[in-house]
Image: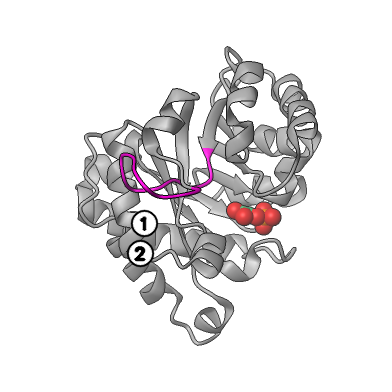
Amino acid sequence: MLVAGNWKMNLDLAAARQLTSGVVAAVGSTHNVDVAICPTFVNLDAMYSIMHGSGIRLGAQTMHEADSGAYTGEISASMLRAVGCHYVILGHSERRQFFGETDDGVSRKAQQARRHRLTPIVCVGEVLEQRESGEQNKVVESQVRKSLSDVSIDNGSELVLAYEPVWAIGTGKTASPEQVAEMHSHIRSILCDLYGNAKGDDVLILYGGSVKPSNAEDLFARENVDGGLIGGASLKADDFAAIVDAARR
Ligand code: PEP
């Protein structure tokens, strides 16, 4: 299991320090469950100093696909490694919606992440109209296959998938445990097709979309739900710790 907090563009340095200290204290040991926080780029280094040794891992929210060069405003994989990142979220729906990220771009970034031994958390998910017209399986399959094209792994722990139906992100609407279980089983079969059963079965598939302490346990109890990518609820140490506890049970 993995529970990862996506802090998005929230918290200045002082507030981020306070939250990280709170998360370290509230989560306690990471026994049984991997835990990660993904602060903004400018706060990564400082957060690593606070959480180093706690077992909680650090992740970034995106990165550039090139090694270095004239890409004003961008951050490379090696820069993320140098400040202690283990994970990088790629293809989050907000990146796709507001910053023009495509499946092809996500694939190039995921390949680069792997070259630098970062574990990509690749996000996929349908929008509301696609769910309403029953196209969600087809849409997500296409996203998974294209976003992972040419992304090779030696074992399943080198890649994480996050199913995040766009209509459930930050809206308070959560996909039902049945909808989540159905999609995760679909994604599992695609991963096994791409990587073979041994590796495909070991890739963690997270659910994201308005996960809270009150619904986490029911979601995490489903087959192929290997944890969560948590937005809003990761900004409160106690809520985030309660979600980690739900993953432990
Ligand atoms: C997210 O942005 O990845 C997310 C799941 O957000 P929230 O938990 O706020 O819906």
Closest to the observer, 227 or 126: 126
Q: Amino acid at mark 2?
A: Asp
Above or below 185: residue 5? above
For disc 1, the neighbor class at 10 Å (few under 14, some 14 to 19, many from 20) is many
Image quadrant holding the C terminus, namely: top right
Residue at mark 2? 103
Q: x, y percentage for residue 69? A: 34, 43
Q: x, y percentage for residue 64? A: 40, 48
Above or below 91: residue 96? below
Q: Which residues are magenta?
A: 60-73
Question: Ligand 1 lies in which image quarter?
Answer: bottom right
Q: Residue at x 31, y 45 (%)?
A: 66
Q: x, y percentage for residue 39? A: 62, 38
Number of the label disc, if any, that sits on residue 106 = 1
Q: Residue at x 31, y 32 (%)?
A: 116
Find numbered disc 2 in the image and state the secondary structure of the residue it sits on: helix
Is the magenta region chiefly helix, strand or loop?
A: loop
Closest to the observer, 66 or 144: 66
Find numbered disc 1 in the image and state the secondary structure of the residue it sits on: helix
